[in-house]
Amino acid sequence: MAYTLSFSVLLGSSKTGLTLAAQIVDTAGANIGGEVTTGFAEIGAGAYLWTYAAMPDAQRGGVKFYQSGVPGTILAFAAVNPEEAENTDAKVSTKAAPGDLMGLADDAITAAKYDESTAFPLKSADTGATQVARVGADGDTLETLSDQIDLQALEATLTAMKGAGWSDETLKALGDLLDAILLDTGTDGVALSTAVKQAIADEVLKRGASNVQDTADAHSLTTLILAAFESAISGTTWTIKKTDGTTFTTKTVITDAAANPITAVT
């Protein structure tokens, strides 16, 4: 890398109009590269300014100035010390320009530099779940704002269903109606009329066992119905059958030849 450096060369009024050359040297006086004849400007009578845009980094030594073609006669000399000539904070070639992205090492923020206990709610190792928001003048937080947004969405949905005309009074009336429904069907259960109760009982009584025999438990009312109409005893085994003749379950029975058998059901 290289940087730009300017030198003032004051030779006196008798040295006006010269074509100068510059030669960079190291601390032993040895030439570094070739002579340079560009970058010179005569500011006044015998007063020159030399600007060089390719001064090597960390170059220590100096610059000899002489009339071009006469390197043996040095007219002026300037020392070059990198700690004085180069930027003390960073070299021009490495300084960030406006708009440049600034990288941050993954471990740049450590516990020694960052106190999580006083930096609510951010953490140095965050999974991305942390949300930052300032509490509003009326106490709004992200949670309360979310609730308000949900309410607005509900009002928009209701308006789309009913059309224009929804108001706070309309919503309150709807809320009161819902509260009344919940009170009627809440902890006391659903209030059913006598006619509804009777209709449910009728449906239970007329429903066939075939609708539940594949999933009914062996100790359910289905077993009693099937045992009464779809069963047979062989030895000590009582086979209770489904309505299609396949086995629903079996029970072990004790028989008595002297007992009176059932010969008919009417």
Image: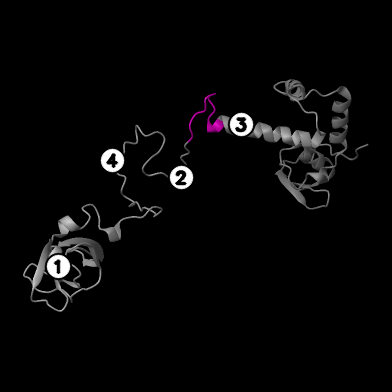
| Residue 236 seen | no
> Would residue 23 appear left or right of 126 to someone viewing this image?
left
- Mark 3 to mark 1: distance in Å? 85 Å
Q: Which residues are magenta?
A: 133-143
Which residue is label 2 attached to? 128
**Discs 4, 2 touching: Cβ within 8 Å:** no
- Please state which of residues 233 and 87 is positioned toward the viewer in this rendering: 87
Q: Earlier in the sequence, mark 4 or mark 2?
A: 4
Which numbered marker is on residue 147?
3
Q: Earlier in the sequence, mark 3 or mark 2?
A: 2
Which residue is label 4 attached to? 113
Give the class, few, some or many, for how many residues have Cα within 10 Å of label 2's Cα (few <14, many ≥20).
few
Which numbered marker is on residue 186?
none
Q: Residue at x 90, y 38 (%)?
A: 265
Mark 2, mark 1: which one is toward the viewer? 1
Label 1 secondary element: helix
